[in-house]
Image (spheres, helix red, strand yellow):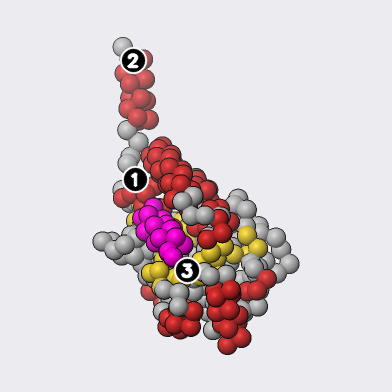
Amino acid sequence: MKRFLASLTLALTIGVAPVSAEPLKVVASFSILGDMVERIAGDRVELTVLVGPGGDAHSFEPGPAHAAALADAKLLVVNGLGFEPWMVRLAAAAKSKAPYAVASFGINPREMDEDHAHDHGHGHGDGHDHGHKHSHDSQGYPSVPHDFDPHAWQNLANGVVYVRNIADALAKADPENADAYETNAAAYIAELQELDAWVRAEIGKVPPERRKVITTHDAFGYFGDAYGIEFHAPLGISGGAQPSAQALARLIDQIRAENIKALFIETMSDARMMETVSRETGAEMGGALYSDALSRAGGDAPTYVAMFRHNVPLLVAAMLKD
Ligand code: ZN
């Protein structure tokens, strides 16, 4: 009897481990990663998103309030590939010791197009180490050579890698909820794989010679590679610098010569340049695509999944236009 009680007490002690009172504090760099964290973790974490709906991570300038959000965070979820060069300064200012979950870790990074290799010179430069290959260091923002395209989430196969990386990092930071993160991630990944098949079927409706699209900044390189569309953009990868008159004239010539019908802006970009291109070429504006930021709740693309559901029909309709 005594032995029975003793083992019962032991079992109770083990079985009724205290439930952690505080949810894990997580900071995600921009809205798409924030949505992924939410899908995987729900209210098991307290999430702060630095560059929110409609924001432009390329030109983001963090302030003291952002540093405060980092101060007691237990996990920093970032894209990597040089997308958030400001994160290094911010983490230093906040004296953050939190590990990084680098969502893009393990994807096949896309080299930046030659045309755009020189037009994104500003806004970068901090925290990069030109001499090193993409390295994974859980204690710091990964250093990458300058010339990788960061918009890897635009390929849903990469999105699956993002979800795995984020779920693994959450499980490591919060082992008590690891099973829930794993279960949610598996269901989410199945949904993304289904979405990927749908995107392929939709793009498949467009004859290959018509699969050409103009966007403001070069955010759809991974999308184009994955789904067989040629994207051209006057503003390059980071969308910062204005194109030269010569570059714009070249683009207009190309649109005319190749009879490109699909002309888009991104939701976070200025429409004026594309309106000029539209006037010059007669190609109609196909609408606004979500590339680097989601919409607010209740908008056209409040989630990563909704972004594809919004963008793909617009792209297909514009490419099929006569
Ligand atoms: Zn971008």
Residue pointed to by mark 3:
261
Q: Which residue lies most toward the left here?
A: 298
Closest to the observer, 214 or 153: 214
Q: Residue type at mark 3: give it.
A: Lys
Residue pointed to by mark 2:
4
At x 46%, y 71%, the residue is 263
Q: Which residue lies most toward the front here?
A: 322
Q: Which quadrant is home to the C terminus? A: bottom left
- Circle 1: element type: loop
Q: Which residues are magenta?
A: 305-322
Residue pointed to by mark 1:
20
> Mark 3 or mark 2: which is in front?
3
Q: Is residue 5 above or below residue 285?
A: above
- Circle 3: element type: loop
Task: Estimate how packed mark 1 is, as few (under 14), some (14 to 19) or many (20 or more) residues with alpha carbons within 10 Å.
Answer: few
Q: Residue type at mark 2: give it.
A: Phe
Q: Residue type at mark 1: give it.
A: Ser
Residue 37 counted in the magenta span: no
At x 46%, y 51%, the residue is 205
At x 68%, y 71%, the residue is 114
Closest to the observer, 193 or 176: 193
